[in-house]
Image (cartoon, helix red, strand yellow):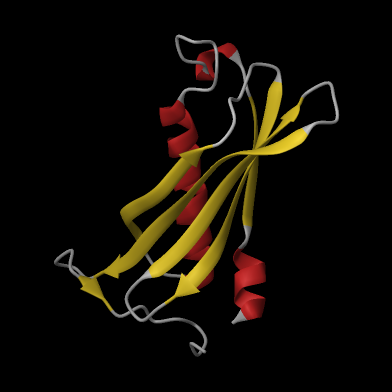
Amino acid sequence: MQYQIEQSITRQCKAIFPNTLNANGTLFGGEAMRWMDEVAYITATRFTRQRMFTIQTDKIRFLRTVRPDSIVEVVGFVEKAEAVKLTVKVEIYMEEMYGETREKAVEATFIFASLDENCRPHRIRYPFELE
């Protein structure tokens, strides 16, 4: 399973421009959460190769303020695989666009399920055996 976890790690980079800022001139938290949910979804789908749905977000922590002229990297990885739930951890790292500083800015956990045609969770059919 470790191989599948490594193969499903998902990374996206974004530049922080004025259209992503809030009234305080820093990254809008809702925008960060949208990016995180997208990366979590891609990670879950790459890991299971099935239609996955976000059923819960947990432990969203805003650790650092993200300012303009930053680059962020959104990284998602599988933290736990169970029969009907998949836990994906997502972290946002920020770095100065014109400097060397890199820090973790946001982290969260996303829980996914595979749903049947009636939108009810059902057992995930992993393309490998769970450990």
Q: Nearer the viewer, residue 125 or 91?
A: 91
Could you tell me residue 16's position as x and y percent? 62, 22
Q: Quadrant of the N terminus?
A: bottom right
Could you tell me residue 72's position as x and y percent? 66, 34
Give above or below for 33 relative to 127.
above
Q: Is residue 37 left or right of residue 123?
A: right
Give above or below for 126 relative to 85.
below
Could you tell me which residue is drawn at 47 percent across and 49 percent down? 108
Could you tell me residue 120's position as x and y percent? 18, 68
Q: Nearer the viewer, residue 114 or 104?
A: 104
Could you tell me which residue is drawn at 65 percent across and 68 percent down? 7
Q: Nearer the viewer, residue 104 or 129?
A: 104
**Outermost residue toward the left?**
118
Could you tell me which residue is drawn at 52 percent across and 86 percent down? 128
Give above or below for 57 relative to 114.
above
Residue 69 in view in this figure: yes
Q: Is residue 121 left or right of residue 34?
A: left
